[in-house]
Amino acid sequence: DAGVIQSPRHEVTEMGQEVTLRCKPISGHDYLFWYRQTMMRGLELLIYFNNNVPIDDSGMPEDRFSAKMPNASFSTLKIQPSEPRDSAVYFCASSFTSPGDEQFFGPGTRLTVL
Amino acid sequence: QKEVEQNSGPLSVPEGAIASLNCTYSDRGSQSFFWYRQYSGKSPELIMFIYSNGDKEDGRFTAQLNKASQYVSLLIRDSQPSDSATYLCAVQPSGNTPLVFGKGTRLSVIA
């Protein structure tokens, strides 16, 4: 398996624009997680899915953030409108059968909002 | 609030020395404990996990767990410059819940 795939790897956009981040989890993994990482706050869990169903989105910072998982092999994280304080590295991760299993991380998307 | 605490560092050790990284957690019912390594600009990767009290060894790495003290540590023997990275402690709290990550300790191994 190719591991968790994320795109794009880098995104530079201007404040107010819509940003969509994409993730393909490892095949057969039931859980998918979206994280944001900054120097100040570390790795923050934004939302996670079990079998394509959102389980806990309490980490999503604002209504500007939304996430979907239309099928087992694809998820998106959307920010609309984007703001400079959204600049961070966004990671997608997946785990096999439990949210407490080892998580496998994608390479991340480095987002810069000007 | 389930918390995982780590000293942010940087922890500097000379090449060949033992590096000791520590982590404490707040949920006494926590079940599983993981150590991830993250190189600068890269994603976290798992290096060890431990479930039971005591020590678990894998090559140069030893994880130590003390549930009574709510403490987990990672020892790296014969530290190499290639071990220079940020080490994240992750804990699965009680219940069917996701891992909680600490903010990481930055390790610098000086040649």
Image: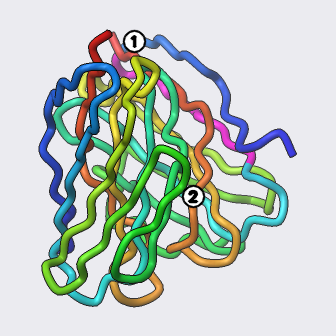
Circle 1: element type:
loop
Residue at 38% in and 61% down: B63
Which secondary structure class fits the magenta region best? Answer: strand
Provide the residue span drawn in magenta. A15-24
Work out whether residue B22 or residue B89 is closer to the camera in this orientation and state it: B22
* Image quarter of residue A107: top right
Answer few, some or many: residues within 10 Å of disc 2's Cα (few below 14, many 20 plus, some between 14 and 19). many
Image coordinates of residue A27 in percent, x first then y, are: 84, 57
Image coordinates of residue A16 in percent, x first then y, are: 37, 22
* Image quarter of residue B28: bottom left
Q: Which residue is mark 1?
A: A14
Give amino acid for label 1: Glu
Image coordinates of residue A97 in percent, x first then y, are: 68, 77
Residue at 63% in and 74% down: A50
Work out whether residue A72 or residue B59 is closer to the camera in this orientation and state it: B59
Image coordinates of residue B26 in percent, x first then y, are: 15, 75
